[in-house]
Amino acid sequence: MEYPVLSHHGGTRGVTGSCHQLHLDPSTSLLIDCGLEQGSDAAPGAASAPLGFDVQGIQALVITHVHLDHVGRIPALLAAGCRGPILCSEPSAQLLPLVLEDAYKLSISSEPAHVARYLKFIRDLVVPVPFEQWHTLVERPGLSCRIRLQRAGHLLGSAYVECDVRHEQANTRYVFSGDLGSGGNPLLRPLQPPERADVLVLESTYGDRLHPPAGDREQRLEAAIDRALADQGTLLIPAFSLGRTQELLYELEGILHRKDLLNKAGPAPDGDPLDWSQLPIILDSPLAQRITCVYRELHDYWNAEARARLAEGRDPLGFSQLISVDTHARHQQVVNYLKSTGRPAIVIAGNGMCSGGRIVNYLKAMLGDSRHEVMFVGYQAKGTPGAVLQASEGAEGFVQIDLDGRMYEVRAKVVTLPGYSGHADQAELVAFASPDRGGAGRVVLVHGDNNAKMALGKAIEEKIKQQGRSIKVFIP
């Protein structure tokens, strides 16, 4: 067998479970991500299943970002005996323990002593790596390997990984994309394509489609809130704790700030249907609150526009109208209060697909009242309550949804707000794989369904052909 060689332990059957092993020689390898298969990709018992591959010789685990479909199998990796360092960006090093702690409590044990021991174990293994700097992993006669993390624009700390491998006399650069962000994230710096990639392992989540323009996303959010609150109801936004929630808070702060300036300048010509300065923004997710606190601390990693807000004395993720709900008792009080009083509010709660978490209690309490509205800003996996509810958008007549084994009538309005995808679309993926100054020699498509992979592969081949070059696209 010729080395280096790739093997894939996830991320090939669908859009979750990314886990790729780069074998440098028969006894030395590198693992890129160790994610959990979720939703329809997952086999029964996937969360507690053994790892399924040999960990001997793994020098390090390199993490692209801290979503569970990229890090959720770390407990199984440790249980299998892997003790190599966990390399990730500096923001990811702070976010990873929060995400793994939450998952550990839900799937393994909530015993405080067990959780504390597990988190210490994780923190002792994590090695923060600065962006844009080479880090040597292996250096011996005839073999060397170094990595470099570059910003991926997917969420705070997300990276794509460049691996420079020298084996005997050959030098090969592998690039692992992780999840690449679209250009619309208001907090993050944009990604730049790799300067070189002999082999590119590329995600293909949206490889068969284009996103709508994101330029007026905040305006669409404001208009949707105006419509929803004109009925003096609550706007419910199911959102994922990491990434999407922080984007929403940032844009809501921008809307509130602009409304405040308009009010100081005098009433709007047509008047506002609501006094926005009295509108509570309720964040009802303990994990999202903890992650938001870390986001605030890591403002040096924000883009220039976001940092400029801080320089103006604003707090985009901690503004005065933001109310955080911590305990379950307080959560239930808020649900009952909003249900009984009808006071206008915006509630952001997890989980994002309505398959669990505190959003479910809000839905149970409010779906039957037409004054309220449910707004989806993220992907809803097939078969989840979120997907069922989203499919009812615009439906007429009697509609019901099953929540925890009981049917609830849907009278609340349901709307989907486009433009909030955290993944690059086909055009952005093609641009990443084939920048004008050069591109990959070979592309391996992962992290997508078959239609997306096939469509993306054809689009990349066509782009490379227009550049007068050829490329090999593989689908494992």
Image (cartoon, helix red, strand yellow):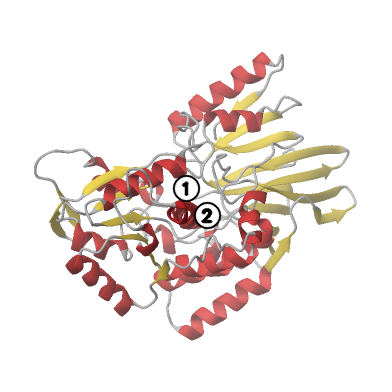
Q: Quadrant of the C terminus?
A: top right
399, above or below 438, in the image: below
257 or 199: nearer the eye?
A: 257
Mark 1 or 2, nearer chain start: 1
Residue 466 position in % (x across, y down): 66, 14
**Disc 1 to disc 2: CB gap under 8 Å:** yes
Q: Toward which corner of the image does residue 424 lie, by quadrant?
A: top right
Q: Toward which corner of the image does residue 65 lie, by quadrant?
A: bottom right
Residue 98 position in % (x across, y down): 53, 69
The residue to which callout 2 is attached is 35
The type of residue carrying mark 1 is: Thr
Q: Secondary structure at mark 1?
A: loop
Q: Is residue 88 visible?
A: no
Q: Residues within 10 Å of mark 2 (few under 14, many from 20)?
A: many
Q: Residue furthest bottom?
A: 113
Q: Secondary structure at mark 2?
A: loop
Residue 291 position in % (x across, y down): 52, 66
Q: Report whether 276 appears left or right of 151.
A: left
Q: Residues within 10 Å of mark 1 (few under 14, many from 20)?
A: many
Q: Is residue 91 visible?
A: yes
Residue 86 position in % (x across, y down): 67, 63
191 or 452: nearer the eye?
A: 191
Q: Report whether 412 appears left or right of 416.
A: left
The residue to which callout 1 is attached is 16
* C-alpha distance separating marks 1 and 2: 7 Å
The type of residue carrying mark 2 is: Gly
